[in-house]
Image: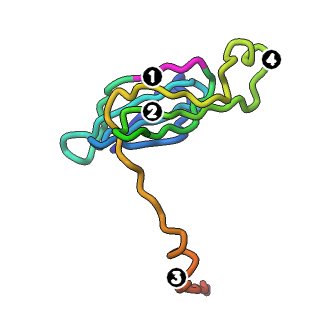
């Protein structure tokens, strides 16, 4: 999936995928979450489905939760805000709990026990 973001929309930060394969992108420096559906051709540009505006400068990460994955949890940051921006965006640094526009899914988990006990392969590079 290819998504081209307008410079005035900030920079992509955290990503999440819903149960339909739609991509959610948190925007650093813009305080929005945009969401896209994949191209019908599997390879190509995505179509934007919508945008969620937050009263913050930095949206950092989103994930779906609750028993039906109909809630979107969004972390934000107050990193390097000016005094004026701190007044303009007083909710920066808080976690937002929103009704999700689409239904999410459980995120993949990594079994850390397997990682710690797996055989490690040492690779040496020679020139």
Examine the rendered structure and indicate whether residue 79 appears above or below residue 51. below
Q: Earlier in the sequence, mark 3 or mark 4?
A: 4
Q: Can the viewer see residue 101 in this picture?
A: yes
**Structural crowding at the residue carrying mark 1, measured as other residues with C-alpha within 10 Å and reported as few (<14), some (14–19) or many (≥20):** some
**Pointer 3 residue:** 118
Q: Tell which of 11 and 95 is nearer to you.
A: 95
Q: CA distance from mark 1 to mark 2?
A: 11 Å
Question: Measuring 50% from the left and 34% from the top, which residue is drawn there?
Answer: 73
Q: CA distance from mark 3 to mark 4?
A: 49 Å
Question: Measuring 53% from the left and 31% from the top, which residue is drawn there?
Answer: 27
Which residue sits furthest left?
40
**Pointer 1 residue:** 52
**Pointer 2 residue:** 72
Are the two marked residues, 2 and 4, in contact with CB atoms closer than 8 angstroms?
Answer: no
* Label 2 residue SS: strand
Are the two marked residues, 1 and 2, in contact with CB atoms closer than 8 angstroms?
Answer: yes
Q: Earlier in the sequence, mark 2 or mark 4?
A: 2
**Structural crowding at the residue carrying mark 4, measured as other residues with C-alpha within 10 Å and reported as few (<14), some (14–19) or many (≥20):** few
Q: Earlier in the sequence, mark 4 or mark 1?
A: 1
Q: Position of residue 24 (x, y in %)?
A: 41, 36
Location of residue 38 (image quadrant)? top left
Q: CA distance from mark 2 to mark 3?
A: 34 Å
Please provide the residue range marked out in magenta.
51-55
């Amino acid at each position: 999936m290819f998504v081209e973001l307008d410079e005035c929309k900030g920079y992509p930060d955290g990503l999440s995928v819903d149960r339909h394969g739609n991509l959610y992108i948190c925007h650093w420096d813009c305080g929005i979450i945009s969401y896209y559906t994949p191209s019908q051709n599997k390879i190509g540009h995505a179509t934007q489905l919508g945008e969620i505006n937050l009263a913050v400068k930095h949206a950092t990460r989103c994930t779906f939760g609750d028993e039906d994955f109909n809630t979107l949890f969004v972390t934000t940051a107050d990193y390097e805000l000016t005094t004026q921006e701190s007044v303009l965006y007083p909710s920066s640094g808080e976690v937002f709990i929103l009704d999700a526009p689409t239904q999410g899914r459980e995120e993949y988990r990594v079994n850390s026990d397997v990682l710690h006990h797996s055989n490690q392969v040492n690779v040496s590079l020679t020139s």
